Amino acid sequence: MDVFTVEETVERVLPGSGRIAVTARVLDLTPGQWTATAAPVSIPQRASRRPPGATRAGHPGPTSSGSTGFAPLIRVRAPGVRIGAWPALVALGATVALGIQALLATRAGLPVAQVAVLSTIACLAGLLGAKLYYLAQHPQQLSARGGGLGGMCLQGFVLAAVATIVAGALSTGVPVGALLDVTAPGLVFGIGIGRLGCFFGGCCAGRPTASRWGLWSSDRRRGLRRIPVQLMESALAMLLGLAALRAVETVTAHPAGTVFIAAIAAYTLGRQLLFPLRDLPRKTTRGRILTMALSGLVLAADIAVALLP
């Protein structure tokens, strides 16, 4: 008879934070039906790991049965996670972005069909860039079973998509600055919609909190009350999208490209301010400070150029 044992530790349990759900996954099991029993483990205080003499506290907990499944799907299943929410909302964000861009391109006198084709190609390039950026930051996922199928980074999407738009505009004769300006509102609106998918999909989760303003959500392993940082970033992007849309519609004398630069710089600055609220370890101690300083300088310089007579 095949058996397995898994122990999960719940870190940083905050008093008053409410209920907690822990999702344990076991890979490479014999396919078929399995029965699992959960039980608490008694660990002496001041012990960093379970010693050989540690015992299970009390009687065995509940027993449940279920069948094995497809590893990439099992990796994203957890209480509080809505399967399919992330791709659906990201796709909706891309659709909204392309629609707003088409309306603004028509108003600006740009070739709408050409811009639409170029932007669609840029979105596909952005997806590839998002995946490559994620794998560059998490190389261990390449060796994990099914791990290379999930995970993307927004930075990679923006870099690849914008580079594709600029290259395409230069090769087709479309004014680069004007095209970037009409792209800016839809881009940040799309990011805002996509961040909703992160909240419901269990990625980029916020830190645990006992605050009444916290919302119960999951990072696909621990479901508990968290700072809703994805919703905060979504609100930031929506506000910047409204500001960029207002600027493109009402300001006609600004140098081409300044609306796009301001929107991206402001979003980057706000995103960095929100990073400490995420439940993710930072890989560098100075990278965030340098990014904030650089984006702040770019934003200030861009506003100064736009206000020049």
Image: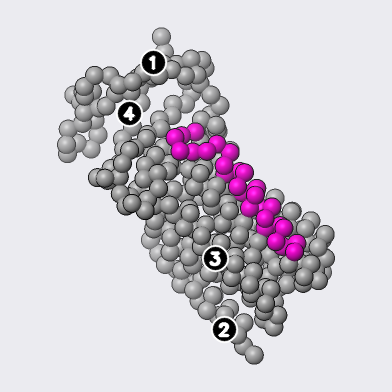
Question: Can you tell which quarter of the image residue 56 is in?
Answer: top left
The residue furthest front is 212
Rendering colour mode: one colour
- Secondary structure beneath dot 1 equals loop
Disc marking residue 7:
4
Q: Is residue 22 above or below residue 37?
A: below
Q: What residue is drawn where x is 46% and y is 72%?
A: 293
- Secondary structure beneath dot 3 equals helix
Disc marking residue 239:
3
Question: Can you tell which quarter of the image residue 80 is in?
Answer: top left
Q: How far is the residue under mark 2 from the one under mark 4? A: 57 Å
Q: How far is the residue under mark 1 from the one under mark 2? A: 67 Å
Q: How far is the residue under mark 3 from the one under mark 4? A: 44 Å
Q: Nearer the viewer, residue 302 or 146?
A: 302
Label 2 belongs to which residue? 304
Disc marking residue 260:
none
| Precedes in sequence: disc 2 or disc 3 | 3
Q: Which segment is the magenta one?
A: 77-103
Q: How far is the residue under mark 1 from the one under mark 3? A: 53 Å
| Precedes in sequence: disc 2 or disc 4 | 4
Q: How far is the residue under mark 4 from the one under mark 1? A: 14 Å
Q: What residue is drawn where x is 68% and y is 70%?
A: 181
Label 1 belongs to which residue? 3
| Precedes in sequence: disc 3 or disc 4 | 4
Q: Amino acid at mark 3?
A: Leu
Q: Is residue 86 magenta?
A: yes
> Could you say where residue 55 lies in the image, as x and y percent from the top left?
21, 23
